[in-house]
Image: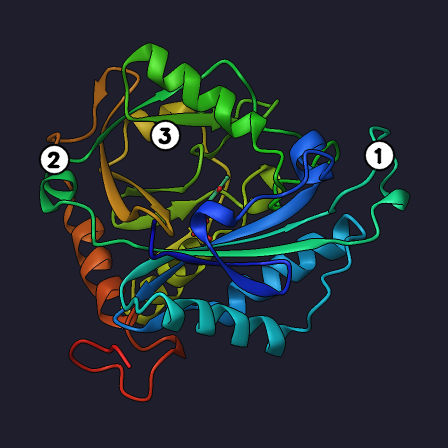
């Protein structure tokens, strides 16, 4: 028996009992929304921003989340406490709920809210020292007018397809372009490049999710006096950049040292990348919602 508790159907159930209907449209059609959130020493990093994005995704697909933000905050905090976690990854899923086999969501009257919390330590140091190898892929990023990348929906096939392409090519991560050939993002992370001490990231309207880590890194870049710009760029700009890095809830800030077989600069994580990762790790324990009275030391209640 696992000791993990999952919030499902309005209550906490054991992991082995956490099952949903095969008629749930989240399962049948990817009809739903989600968030991946990180907890650092009892602090749910940028929880309000994640909830804002979750409710905006739901608004966009006319999905009614049966809790307000305050109630969902409480549920997330309670899930972390119930599992006695202090450094964790949280997955919040809201599916359209059970319906019939037809597409029409009108018949799904009971949206399902699921919160999963699992222990997650920082990724190994070596990964950050070595950096990632990235390859551009043939599959283009969903056009914003077809399925907006801002809707963090349960339909992640676009991202899964590019991950498969990256696996086939033997690289760590995919680089997705839009239909014009401009760089958008990775399969589950945003991209930044540095050239002549200017930091660039693509504007999200080109076809990237507005990542919460992306925004946090942009804020830190401004705060530390870097010249930070949102501007379109192509693969060529990536190949000749001084530094390339990815950002995301899972990877935080990670250097890219090779793109499409081209070594980036000297093939080592750059100074600005490393500085921003260090600054990021300084704010993750305080910028968010505390789960316990005291978030110092173990942070456990
Ligand atoms: N792009 C995509 C497609 C993603 O799935 C993610 C992960 N949520 C990101 C970017 C990074 O976003 P965040 O920093 O909010 O995790």
Q: Residue at x 34, y 49 (%)?
A: 1
Quadrant of the rendered image containing residue 261: top left
Mark 1 sits on what residue? Answer: 100
Relative to 232, is 294 above or below?
below
Looking at the picture, tell me which residue is in the foreground, 256 or 63: 63
Q: Residue at x 39, y 25 (%)?
A: 174
Q: Quadrant of the C terminus?
A: bottom left
The local secondary structure at tag 3 comes to: helix
Is disc 1 in contact with disc 3, using a CB cutoff of under 8 Å? no
Q: Earlier in the sequence, mark 1 or mark 3?
A: 1
Crowdedness near tag 3: few (<14), some (14–19) or many (≥20) residues, C-alpha within 10 Å: some
Alpha-carbon span between mark 2 and mark 3: 22 Å
Q: Earlier in the sequence, mark 1 or mark 2?
A: 1
Relative to 211, is 20 above or below?
above
Which mark identifies residue 89?
Answer: none
Is disc 1 in contact with disc 2, using a CB cutoff of under 8 Å? no
Relative to 91, is 71 above or below?
below
The label nearer to you, 1 versus 3, is 1
Mark 2 sits on what residue? Answer: 130
User: Which residue is farthest top?
Assistant: 168
The local secondary structure at tag 2 comes to: helix
x, y percentage for residue 277?
Answer: 22, 56
């Amino acid at each position: 028996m696992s000791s993990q508790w999952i919030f499902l159907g309005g209550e906490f159930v054991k992991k082995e009992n956490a099952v949903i209907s095969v008629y749930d449209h989240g399962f049948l059609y990817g009809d739903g929304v989600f968030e991946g959130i990180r907890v650092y020493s009892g602090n749910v990093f940028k929880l309000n921003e994640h909830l804002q994005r979750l409710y905006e995704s739901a608004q966009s697909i006319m999905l009614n989340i049966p809790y307000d933000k305050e109630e969902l905050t409480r549920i997330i905090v309670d899930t972390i406490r119930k599992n006695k976690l202090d450094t964790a990854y949280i997955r919040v899923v809201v599916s359209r709920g059970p319906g019939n086999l037809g597409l029409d969501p009108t018949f799904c009257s009971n949206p399902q809210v699921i919160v999963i919390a699992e222990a997650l330590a920082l990724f190994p140091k070596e990964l950050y020292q070595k950096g990632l190898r990235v390859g551009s892929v043939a599959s283009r990023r969903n056009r914003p007018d077809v399925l907006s990348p801002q809707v963090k929906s349960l339909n992640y096939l676009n991202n899964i397809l590019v991950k498969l392409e990256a696996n086939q090519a033997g690289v760590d991560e995919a680089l997705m372009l839009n239909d014009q050939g401009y760089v958008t993002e990775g399969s589950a992370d945003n991209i930044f490049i540095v050239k002549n001490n200017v930091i660039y990231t693509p504007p999200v309207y080109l076809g990237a999710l507005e990542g919460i880590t992306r925004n946090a890194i942009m804020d830190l870049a401004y705060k530390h006096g870097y010249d930070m710009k949102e501007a379109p760029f192509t693969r060529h700009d990536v190949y000749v950049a001084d530094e390339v890095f990815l950002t995301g809830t899972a990877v935080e800030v990670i250097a890219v040292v090779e793109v499409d077989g081209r070594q980036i600069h000297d093939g080592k994580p750059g100074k600005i990348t490393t500085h921003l990762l260090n600054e990021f790790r300084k704010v993750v324990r305080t910028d968010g919602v505390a789960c316990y009275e005291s978030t110092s030391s173990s942070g456990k209640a």
